[in-house]
Amino acid sequence: MSSAPLLEVRGLNAWYGESHVLHGVDLDIREGETVTLLGRNGAGKTTTLRAIMGILRRREGVIRLCGKDLLSLPLHKVAQTGIGYVPEERGIFASLSVSENLILPPTVSDSGMSVEEIYKLFPNLHERRSSQGTKLSGGEQQMLAIARVLRTGAKIILLDEPTEGLAPVIVQRIGDVLMALKERGMTILLVEQNFRFARKVADRFYLMEDGRMVNSFPGHELDARMDELHEVLGV
Ligand SMILES: Nc1ncnc2c1ncn2[C@@H]1O[C@H](COP(=O)(O)OP(=O)(O)OP(=O)(O)O)[C@@H](O)[C@H]1O
């Protein structure tokens, strides 16, 4: 680990009201890396993403992006630092068309993808460009949610279970998109329960249990650790 991490999380504690959910989470993601968070339901994966983004406000510890402190920033300033978030519920504008959803996101850097580039990466969004958000399939909504973040020029994208509830052929399509983003040098933090999908894209895994990171290992060790993972994940 020579270069400084792009995203650095140290000793992160977070609370929902009085409920203490994250207990000293440490996480490092280097530029261009794809890192996947594993853990059983309730382990704190979504909470980690929400705490990094500042949606969950009661936090203590260190969160830095390119060395810049995120913890003290107001919510609306966090995305402007170049960190994009695709929540599990996707967060697209249901009443707007695909093309309107793509035009709306504010830009955080010049490196954001143009609408033309987006349509090249997601030909199905081009076909559906005039369709309203509510009329899209789950897979199309997921792709639109990812595309919206790519428009902004974010350096790192946080994805919460992008394959959940989607048909295998769509899961594969999303995998192809993430591989294309990796090739472009995008840094990705992924929460994912689908091993087959995660194996394809992840350079490194973190394992969470009860609001703590309990292990981290490189992607190629996934198969050798399957028994241990099944035990911790209860799957
Ligand atoms: N809005 C909330 N208010 C209070 N507690 C919450 C809230 N959201 C989550 N929690 C609690 O925080 C803990 C971590 O939940 P979190 O959603 O981060 O887990 P997860 O690992 O993402 O699992 P899942 O796959 O179920 O989303 C759980 O104990 C959960 O019950």
Image (spheres, rainbow, N blue to C red):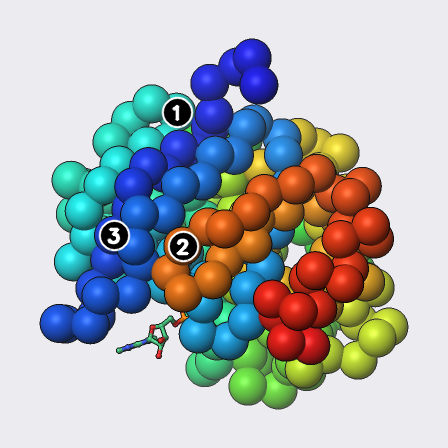
Measuring from the top left, give residue 86's x and y in whole percent. Answer: 49, 60
Residue at 25%, 52% in the rendered image: 13
* Amino acid type shown at disc 3: Asn
The answer to whether marks 3 and 2 mark residues whose Cβ atoms lie closer than 8 Å is no
Between the residue at mark 3 and the residue at mark 1, the CA separation in whole angstroms equals 21 Å
Q: Residue furthest right?
A: 169
Judging depth in this view, the residue of 127 and 25 nearest the camera is: 25
Up the image or down, 151 lies above or below 38; here it is above
Q: Nearer the viewer, mark 3 or mark 1?
A: 3
For disc 1, the marked residue is: 66
Between the residue at mark 3 and the residue at mark 2, the CA separation in whole angstroms equals 9 Å
**Mark 1 Cα shell of 10 Å, populated few (<14), some (14-19), many (≥20):** some
Q: Is residue 79 left or right of residue 157?
A: left
Looking at the image, is mark 3 or mark 2 earlier in the sequence? 3
For disc 2, the marked residue is: 212
Label 1 element class: loop
* Amino acid type shown at disc 2: Arg
For disc 3, the marked residue is: 13
Question: Exactly how many numbered labels are in the figure?
Answer: 3
* Amino acid type shown at disc 1: Cys
Which quarter of the figure is the N terminus placed in?
Answer: top right
Which quarter of the figure is the C terminus placed in?
Answer: bottom right
Residue at 33%, 37% in the rendered image: 10
Judging depth in this view, the residue of 62 and 100 nearest the camera is: 62
Res. 187 image quadrant: top right
Looking at the image, is mark 3 or mark 1 earlier in the sequence? 3
Measuring from the top left, give residue 125's x and y in whole percent. Answer: 70, 65
Residue at 43%, 34% in the rendered image: 7
